[in-house]
């Protein structure tokens, strides 16, 4: 278990590879449930009544898009390990983002000025880190160069964000 935690932190530092992730449907299901829970808590904290539904749509869109990308690259056999690597590595990022979001709310953002700007900058850094993590994972899983994985990761981030907004306008 400790080795698994170290593996996910290696991925966050862009050292690990998705091919090193264990092939375990139960582990993937647990990681997705943790991701859904963290996302629902974060969305609900911002007063979103449909937080849970939005938190389910987001990973579903991501899983479908990654499956499509890997199918196009004839790498469908890597789907389980790719998703395990992604969801395992993104959980610490979600925890950091949740802390920043709650801090942003705590300082009463519209009135806080520079403190609110600090939290907004932190959220931007989390978004950039998340996108870089996607680039790293897609590059390794789809056998792409970084220059090929970067637009795919940006498009994937936009696709999931816009998809949630289109399917559930009040979700975020």
Image: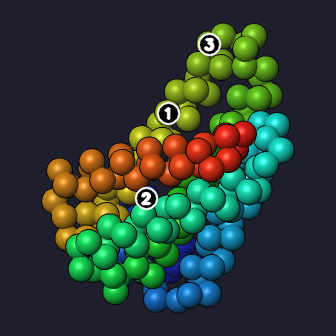
Circle 2 packing at 10 Å, graded few (<14), some (14-19), many (20+), is many
Q: Is residue 157 above or below residue 30?
A: above
Depth check: give the residue in front, 135 or 53: 53
Residue 64 horizontal/vertical position (percent): 47, 68
CA–CA distance in space, label 2 to label 3: 29 Å
Q: Secondary structure at mark 1?
A: helix
Mark 2 vs 1, N-terminal side:
2
Q: How many marks?
A: 3
Residue 124: image tag: 1
Residue 12: image tag: 2
In the image, what residue occupies the spot 54% across and 49% down? 163
Depth check: give the residue in front, 46 or 132: 46
Residue 81 horizontal/vertical position (percent): 42, 80
In the image, what residue occupies the spot 77% across and 22% down? 107
Circle 1 packing at 10 Å, graded few (<14), some (14-19), many (20+), is few
Circle 3 packing at 10 Å, graded few (<14), some (14-19), many (20+), is few
């Amino acid at each position: 278990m400790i080795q698994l935690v170290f593996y996910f932190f290696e991925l966050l530092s862009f050292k690990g590879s998705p091919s090193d992730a264990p092939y375990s449907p139960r582990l993937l299901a647990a990681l997705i449930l943790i991701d859904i829970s963290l996302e629902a808590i974060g969305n609900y904290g911002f007063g979103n009544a449909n937080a849970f539904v939005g938190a389910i749509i987001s990973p579903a869109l991501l899983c479908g898009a990654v499956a499509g990308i890997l199918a196009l690259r004839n790498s469908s056999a890597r789907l389980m390990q790719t998703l395990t690597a992604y969801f395992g590595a993104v959980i610490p990022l979600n925890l950091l983002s949740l802390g920043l979001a709650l801090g942003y709310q705590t300082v009463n953002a519209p009135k806080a000025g520079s403190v609110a700007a600090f939290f907004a900058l932190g959220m931007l850094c989390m978004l950039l880190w998340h996108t870089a993590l996607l680039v790293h994972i897609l590059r390794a899983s789809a056998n792409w160069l970084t220059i090929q994985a970067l637009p795919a990761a940006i498009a994937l981030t936009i696709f999931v964000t816009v998809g949630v907004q289109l399917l559930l306008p009040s979700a975020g």
